[in-house]
Structure formats: structure tokens, C-alpha cells
């Protein structure tokens, strides 16, 4: 089968890495890809993966490319093409594609939609209200003493959530989004949630329209600096599994979220094929969903796919075809840790084009894989080309040993201005 993967981050490198291991894959393209993806080869035919210079949101060009190459399955990594209706477009043109259609992708592209859905179908979530004018929004925030999360409805490059600790701050956040239009039309409506305290973890479930199969837990580290300080980022590292939910608790939480979610999807005629990724807060009064994403988390993919023992092609096929009920997800009992190496300045401005040294040495280490995110090839040298540059991922017998292995690899890699967190997985080891 011929595959096309859409995207250019660590998530897409991990997807490509796992796909090329499958005997079902004869040839694979990635649009637009990165320097690491370009170095992969299919196990079956030895053909190099080809990166195609088409952006993930250039839907018409991607469609023409998939038609020309007679792609058997297109795999969509990022949220934007899903929200733009890439799946609908491909299906309308008779092409097989993996990911939720535009209506289903609303779980991520509209926080108002998600919040209303959660409340309608009795899913565990924060106390919340949805607003389009500032007055009632401020009154609701005041009823929470201003301790709340003010969220722009639409996609806002991961920046649309403002955490507030008091009334003045909440009023400012509401004005910024609803009055000053800081996020443009993405902020025409907002969700205000009560501020929840607790341990935040990621859940993922693979869905086929009727069935949802829950993954083990993982935990991302969203803030730029150690100790969860600094600015919010797209994720500075992950590990899996987490010790915060036993298998029994995970099953209970999974059921509490996924059963009403599936029922709601049937009632609302939402045909969801792809990954549902709820962000979850483990509060004193039980686990609560903060938000949904409708695709793999970027650093989460890297730890999940290193632990996944199934053939990924078979899982994606089942997710597309609605036959997931017959499949069993198989996970290594080993732990996985991914440390993100980022450009100096990220998530603010950062330079590009810095040569990355040490990759060849790390490639020789056992049970370690460096997934590329923001990289490019320049005169045959791998250089930085984004904020998050690499996801250095190790698999090992337990979390402690794996954390050490990941950092041992990180220490061997350098580029000018590099920054990374030194406490990935530390919460689990306390
Ligand atoms: P979201 O995009 O909705 O997940 O929000 C981004 C980040 O903001 C989350 O990963 C949480 O760390 C934080 N956050 C969102 N909602 C809440 C909430 N209700 N209480 C506390 N923190 C929140």
C-alpha cells in the first residue's frame, strides 16, 4: 500500500517511523515532512520516504498529489487540515483518508461545541459557561471569584487559553478576547471554566465511528521551564505510562468519558474516525475533562508509538473501516520517555538554521530514537528549522532507567541556544 502522511512535526515523524515498519507499506510520502522523516525507509521495499513540498493546509494540492500517486491511505497528523475539512474533501473524491471529518473535528476546533456536548451528555468536566458578550461573561467569572480559564472558541495556535487568578485578570482576559478580538474570529465566542487544581494527564482513544479503544496514560509537560514554570508551549516532553491512575481507575475514567461520548456521537450523527485526545485534570473530586483534541498529541505520539506493539497500518485501517471492535491494542510493558530539545527563545521568537551535532552518535544507542520536529537539511547538514526541534525518546524497563537513557542521549546532542527541560517524568518518580 502507498501512504501519504500530512504534517512536519515529531508526531508525524513518529507516525512515519511506525508505518514504515509495517509489511503493508510499500512506499510512503510525507507533506511537507522534515529532515528526520526524509531519512526513514520502508522495511518492506527499502524505498526512502520522500518529503513533498506541499503545506499541510494546501488541501487542493494535497488532493492532486494523492490522486497522481494513487495513494491508498492518507494519514492526517495536525489539527488545522482536519478543521478545514481535508477528510471530507478526500472522501468526496473517492480517496481513503484517516482522521475525523470536519463535523467530528469540531471537538477540537470549537471549545463551545465541546463544552456544550460534554454537558449535554453528562461527561465529567469543569463547571463552565459559554458567552459571546462581555457582560454576562464577567458576571460568571465573578461568581468564580475570577479563578477560571477563559478560552477562545476556535483554533488559536495553542494560545487561546488564559488562566486567571482573580476578577480583574478575568475581566481583562474576557475583554482581550471578546472586545479587542486578540484571536480574531476564533474568539467570537468563549468558554469560561472554573479553575481546576490537580495533576493533568493525557488520554488518547482510537475511534472508528462505533468503538473507542483507550490507550494507556501519558503526561505532557506544557510549560517551557522546569517545575512547570514559564510560558505554555506545544509540549516539552512526555512519558508513558503515568502512575496516577491504576489500570482499574483508567478503565473507570475511560468508561465515564467514552461511553457518553459515543452515545452523544450517535445522537448527533457525528461519525468520528481517528484519535480523540481528552486533556484530563485529576482533581480531588474526580477526573474532569479540560478539553478535547481530535488528533494525536505531538509529544504523546512519540511515547505511545514506541510502546505500541500492533502494526499501525492494521489499526488505522480498522479505524477507517469501522472494524476496530475486532482488534486488541497491544502495548509494551516498558516505559517510554520523550525529552523535547527546543530552539533558544521558544515559544517566543527563535533563530533557525543552527547545525545540530551528535545525531549520528545517538543513532547508535539501543532503545533510543530521535524524532525530528523542526529540522531541515542544508548542504547535507541537519539544521534547526522550528521551535521544537527534536523529541529524544527512549524505551526501557522502568521509568527511572528510561528517563536516564533519554537524558544520556540528550547530552550527546547540541546546537546553539538549545533548551530543554531537565525534569521530564520527575513528577512520576517523586
Ligand atoms: P486547553 O487547550 O483547554 O487544554 O488549555 C491549555 C492548558 O490550560 C491545559 O493544558 C491546562 O494546563 C490549562 N487549563 C485549561 N483549562 C483549565 C481549567 N479549567 N483549570 C485549570 N487549568 C486549565
Image: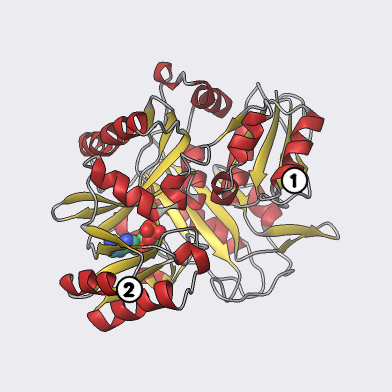
Q: Residue at x 21, y 41 (%)?
A: 122
Q: Residue furthest bottom?
A: 168
* Quadrant of image for the N terminus: top right
Where is 15 relative to 343, above or below? Answer: above
Residue 74 on image: x %, y %: 65, 33
Mark 1, other Cα within 10 Å: few <14 / some 14–19 / many ≥20? many
Mark 2, other Cα within 10 Å: few <14 / some 14–19 / many ≥20? some
Q: Is residue 215 left or right of residue 47?
A: left
Q: Residue at x 35, y 74 (%)?
A: 174
Q: In this view of the protein, which residue sits in the foreground, 408 or 84?
A: 84
> Could you tell me which secondary element the residue under label 2 belongs to?
helix
Q: Residue furthest top?
A: 326
Q: Residue at x 65, y 22 (%)?
A: 23
Q: Is mark 2 within 8 Å of ligand 1?
A: no
Can you see residue 348? yes
Q: Which residue is mark 2?
A: 134
Q: Which residue is mark 1?
A: 38
Q: How many marks?
A: 2
Q: In this view of the protein, which residue sits in the foreground, 6 or 150?
A: 150
Q: Tell me which corner region of the image, top left, top right, bottom left or bottom right, holds residue 177.
A: bottom left
Mark 1–mark 2 Cα distance, whole angstroms, equals 49 Å
Q: Is residue 51 left or right of residue 228?
A: right
Residue 364 on image: x %, y %: 65, 46
Q: Is residue 354 left or right of residue 160?
A: right
Residue 143 on image: x %, y %: 16, 71
* Quadrant of image for the C terminus: bottom left
Q: Residue at x 19, y 75 (%)?
A: 142
Amino acid at each position: 500500500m502507498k501512504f501519504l502522511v500530512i504534517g512536519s512535526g515529531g508526531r508525524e515523524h513518529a507516525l512515519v517511523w511506525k508505518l514504515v515498519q509495517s509489511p503493508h507499506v510499500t512506499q510512503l510520502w510525507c507533506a511537507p515532512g522534515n529532515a528526520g522523516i526524509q531519512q526513514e525507509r520502508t522495511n518492506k521495499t527499502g524505498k526512502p520516504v520522500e518529503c513533498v513540498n506541499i503545506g499541510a493546509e494546501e488541501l487542493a494540492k494535497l488532493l492532486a498529489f494523492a490522486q497522481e500517486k494513487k495513494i491508498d491511505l492518507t494519514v492526517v497528523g495536525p489539527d488545522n487540515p482536519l478543521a478545514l475539512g481535508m477528510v471530507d474533501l478526500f472522501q468526496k473524491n473517492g480517496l481513503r483518508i484517516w482522521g475525523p471529518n470536519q463535523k467530528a473535528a469540531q471537538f477540537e476546533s470549537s471549545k463551545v461545541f465541546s463544552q456544550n456536548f460534554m454537558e449535554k451528555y453528562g461527561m465529567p468536566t469543569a463547571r463552565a459557561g459559554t458567552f459571546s458578550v462581555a457582560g454576562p461573561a464577567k458576571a460568571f467569572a465573578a461568581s468564580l471569584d475570577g479563578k477560571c480559564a477563559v478560552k477562545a472558541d476556535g483554533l488559536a495556535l495553542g494560545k487561546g487559553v488564559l488562566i486567571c487568578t482573580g476578577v480583574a485578570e478575568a475581566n481583562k482576559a474576557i475583554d482581550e478576547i471578546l472586545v479587542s478580538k486578540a484571536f480574531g474570529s476564533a474568539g467570537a465566542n468563549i468558554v469560561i471554566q472554573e479553575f481546576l487544581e490537580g495533576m493533568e494527564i493525557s488520554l488518547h482513544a482510537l475511534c472508528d465511528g462505533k468503538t473507542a479503544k483507550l490507550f494507556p496514560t501519558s503526561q505532557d509537560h506544557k510549560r517551557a521551564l522546569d517545575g512547570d514554570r514559564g510560558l505554555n508551549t506545544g509540549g516539552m516532553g512526555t512519558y508513558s505510562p503515568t502512575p496516577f491512575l491504576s489500570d482499574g481507575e483508567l478503565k473507570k475514567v475511560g468508561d465515564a468519558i467514552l461511553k457518553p461520548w459515543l452515545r452523544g456521537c450517535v445522537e448527533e450523527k457525528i461519525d468520528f474516525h481517528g484519535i480523540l485526545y481528552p486533556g484530563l485534570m485529576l482533581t480531588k473530586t474526580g477526573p474532569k475533562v479540560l478539553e478535547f483534541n481530535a488528533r494525536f498529541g505531538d509529544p504523546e505520539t512519540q511515547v505511545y508509538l514506541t510502546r505500541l506493539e500492533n502494526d499501525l497500518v492494521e489499526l488505522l485501517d480498522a479505524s477507517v473501516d469501522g472494524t476496530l471492535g475486532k482488534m486488541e491494542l497491544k502495548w509494551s510493558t516498558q516505559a517510554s520517555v520523550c525529552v523535547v530539545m527546543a530552539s533558544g527563545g521558544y515559544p517566543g521568537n527563535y533563530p533557525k538554521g543552527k547545525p545540530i551535532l551528535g545525531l549520528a552518535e545517538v543513532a547508535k544507542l539501543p532503545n533510543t530514537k530521535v524524532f525530528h520536529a523542526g529540522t531541515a537539511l542544508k548542504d547535507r547538514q541537519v539544521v534547526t528549522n522550528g521551535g521544537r526541534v527534536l523529541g529524544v525518546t527512549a524505551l526501557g524497563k522502568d521509568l527511572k532507567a528510561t528517563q536516564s537513557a533519554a537524558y544520556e542521549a540528550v547530552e550527546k546532542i547540541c546546537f546553539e541556544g538549545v533548551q530543554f527541560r531537565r525534569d521530564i517524568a520527575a513528577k512520576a518518580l517523586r
